[in-house]
Amino acid sequence: MTNDQSTDLEKLIQQASQGDADAQVYLGVAYATGLGVPRDYVQAAKWYRLAADQGVAEAQFKLGVAYDTGRGVPQDDAQAVKWYRLAADQGDAEAQFFLGGMYGTGRGVPQDYVQAMKWFRLAGDQGHEEAQFNLGVMYVAGQGVPQDDAQAVKWFRLAADQGFALAQNNLGVAYATGEGVPQDYVQAHMWFNLVAAQGEENGKNSRDLVEKNMTPQQIERAQELARNWEPKETMSKNNDFYLEFRNLKS
């Protein structure tokens, strides 16, 4: 650490110690990711809690993650739900998604698919791709809502349009089987091809299988569509904390 970095850190700690919520969140992230300081999850949780107690949604979500994973605090599903809910009630899409997951799996709360759908939908409406995918899965299964293939396709498409491979695969299946949409092998091939391009073997296998029902012209058209496809980015997730938590949960 350079002298300038050391001075910046001292200023940040001073601001956080004086109650600056933004500084507290930043300091928590720094400790959680090892950004300019040794990684220390206990310190991260300490600073998240101080900001969370001031009502900062981002800090509430991150403190929920700490309890969810047991990093810096004892693992506690009920406490995770508490902090996720506080952030979710303020409109934090990540917290809404994780709260939906808690209801879907019955962790920290009684399992309740209706509540899971509620929170996934709130996150999905903000463009959260995994929430959108989960909504599609729940419409297929009829969990918390009446079974509806057309609604499943709607939500799979929203996530697939962002490049989410699982949703792209399920959308390909829908087009291949004609469930929720008119059967369309060109569209099925395109989506399976996009899945395969992400290194997913099932996408390659499904693409090769659907090709058996296609003409050379249809295959060429599907390949052209795949080459010209571009993702639609609706949520920014390119931060160190998000990437680290995704790696932790996978």
Image (cartoon, rainbow, N blue to C red):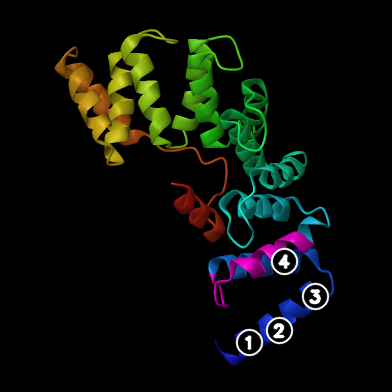
Q: Secondary structure at mark 4?
A: helix
**3D distance between C-alphas at marks 4 and 3:** 9 Å
Toward the viewer: 150 or 228?
150
Q: Are marks 2 and 3 in contact (CB under 8 Å)?
A: no
The three-letter code of the residue at mark 2 reads Glu
The three-letter code of the residue at mark 4 reads Trp
The three-letter code of the residue at mark 3 reads Ser
Q: Secondary structure at mark 3?
A: helix
Q: Residues within 10 Å of mark 4 (few under 14, many from 20)?
A: many
Query: Which residue shows up at 66% across the image and 28% down it?
Result: 110
Identify the mark at residue 17; answer none if there is no mark. 3
Image coordinates for residue 149, horizontal then vertical, percent: 48, 11
Task: Tell me which numbered mark, 2 or 3, is placed earlier along the sequence.
Answer: 2
Q: Is residue 136 magenta?
A: no
Task: Tell me which numbered mark, 4 or 1, is placed earlier along the sequence.
Answer: 1
> Mark 3 or mark 1: which is in front?
3
Image coordinates for residue 139, horizontal then vertical, percent: 53, 16
Q: Which residues are magenta?
A: 34-50
Identify the mark at residue 47; answer none if there is no mark. 4
> Which residue lies under the disc numbered 2?
10
**3D distance between C-alphas at marks 4 and 1:** 18 Å
Q: Are marks 2 and 1 in contact (CB under 8 Å)?
A: yes
Q: Residues within 10 Å of mark 2 (few under 14, many from 20)?
A: few
Task: Tell me which numbered mark, 3 or 1, is placed earlier along the sequence.
Answer: 1
Q: Is residue 54 above or below residue 113?
A: below
Q: Secondary structure at mark 1?
A: helix
Query: Which residue shows up at 64% across the image and 48% down it?
Result: 76
> Which residue lies under the disc numbered 1?
6
Task: Tell me which numbered mark, 4 or 3, is placed earlier along the sequence.
Answer: 3
